[in-house]
Image: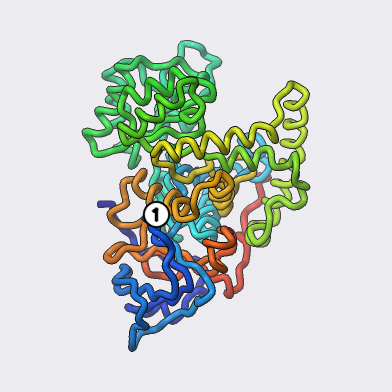
Amino acid sequence: MRRHCRFLLVLPTLLSLIAAAQEFAIHAGTLLDGTGASARHDLYLTVKNHHITGISSSRPPHIAIEEFPADTIVPGFVDAHGHIAAIGLGEEADERLLNERNQEAWALCNARDALASGVTTLRDPGTYLWTLAMRSRIEATGLRWIPAGRQLVKKSTDPKAYMDAMFAEFDGIQDARAQVRARKTEGSEFIKLRLTKQRPLPSLDETRAVVEEAHRLGMKVAVHTDVPFDEAVHMAIAAGVDSLEHNAALRVADADKTLAEIVQRGIFVVPGFGNWIARFEPLWVDSKQIPEEPLRSKLPPALVEAMQAHAVELRQQGLDMKKEDYDPAKRKPAALQETLRAFNAGVTLATGPDTGVDLIPHGRLYKDMDWYVDAGIPIEAVVQIATLNGARAAGIDKETGSLTASKIADFVVLRGDLTKDHDFRHVLLVVRGGYVAFRATDKWTPCALPPASL
């Protein structure tokens, strides 16, 4: 069980009757509980002492009630793959706005913007020592943050091999185990292992050592693999990892066999297709329309401007790729089919578009959810992918992830009937731990951040 801190409200103006009440209720026209069950209608969800106490068709007497009779209540969203230290531009483009002077302010802004979009939990598969050091400040915004800390990478003999302050190297079985223990000491809650072409591939024994040591310490292991890199996917599965991050697992040559093994082993897959859509979106969407409302009005204006400039760059990259006979627009239907095939095979998918990278700032998780809807997955299952499945991947499903009595009161009210309009972006209310973290009717002021120039 994770330790909970009592967080501060993001803005004093968000204080309301229900934020102060020990017991209150939400009356919603539609309720999707995150378990995959069919939608229910005209219900009251009650909260007492920061936990859900029940869901009923009867109006509870003698307590404060918030009315949303035409709207939908769902569990708080779990971003299963997002980076609190990244702002949505990409490694080089980030430098236009982000540096050591303002990086902590950006991390806190990211947490605030995530909450306003309905994300109550962020599973962060790779961050820095400086972000781990500010964990209490991040969670004081209200966001539940589950960091992997520094990512494990196989040591390379090439002095020009890609290296980052977010990486920690290992070489050999004993060192692999030692590096897992070191991450635990640093404050990591799970392990992120990179099996990529940027580095030598570790042996299966080294990979198993990482998994075994992590499991011994009560930690899960998430693995990043490239596309295409079937060898890495198969190694990760054989080693017994807990989750596969990004799209490679859905695109291996022997997909049917591999997906069956993933299901048999109970491995989670966090594809992150929303990032793929966002990266190529400038090919068919005017850069000035990125990001769309209402997110555009919530983000710092400097970030919106930088995103639109980066969109122009990504458009050119996409056009160059088309000249090389790769058309992203033609790739999209195949990717949708791969997603649906994995879902139909029984793979447990979780939402996580690599938040913080190209054109996916914190607050744009709905792009990933839109993808699952486009793939033809039922809306009840899409909500489960974005809530309970992410909580399970993070190991916190006993406390959050579904609208279930006794769980922590983390939930979101979305405008309209989600079963009809499938619109995740219009957030009316966010409750985290029984407190109001965002209310659409309150005045919202985008983060004020120090300039990037020193």
Residue 287 coordinates in the image, percent (x, y): 76, 47
* In the displayed structure image, the side of residue 166 where residue 146 appears, left or right: left
Residue 25 image position (x, y, % from top left): 38, 77
- Asked if residue 29 lies left or right of residue 285, the reply is left
When the figure is inspected, residue 96 is found, relative to residue 164, above or below; the finding is below
At 54% from the left and 50% from the top, the residue drawn is 369
The location of residue 136, given as percent across then percent down, is: 39, 54
- Residue sitting nearer the eye, 54 or 17: 54
Q: Determine whether, in the image, residue 219 is placed left or right of residue 112.
A: left
Give the mark count.
1
Q: Is residue 307 visible?
A: yes
Is residue 101 in sight in this rendering?
A: no
Q: Quadrant of the C terminus?
A: top right
- Outermost residue, top side: 157
Q: Nearer the viewer, residue 235 or 186?
A: 235
In this picture, is 368 found above or below 439? above
- For label 1, the crowd category at 10 Å Cα-Cα, with few meaning under 14, some 14 to 19 and many 20 or more, is some
Element at label 1: loop
Residue topped by disc 1: 36
Q: Mark 1: which amino acid?
A: Gly
- Give the residue displayed 59% in from the left and 63% down from the top: 426
Q: Residue at position x 44%, y 23% from top?
A: 195
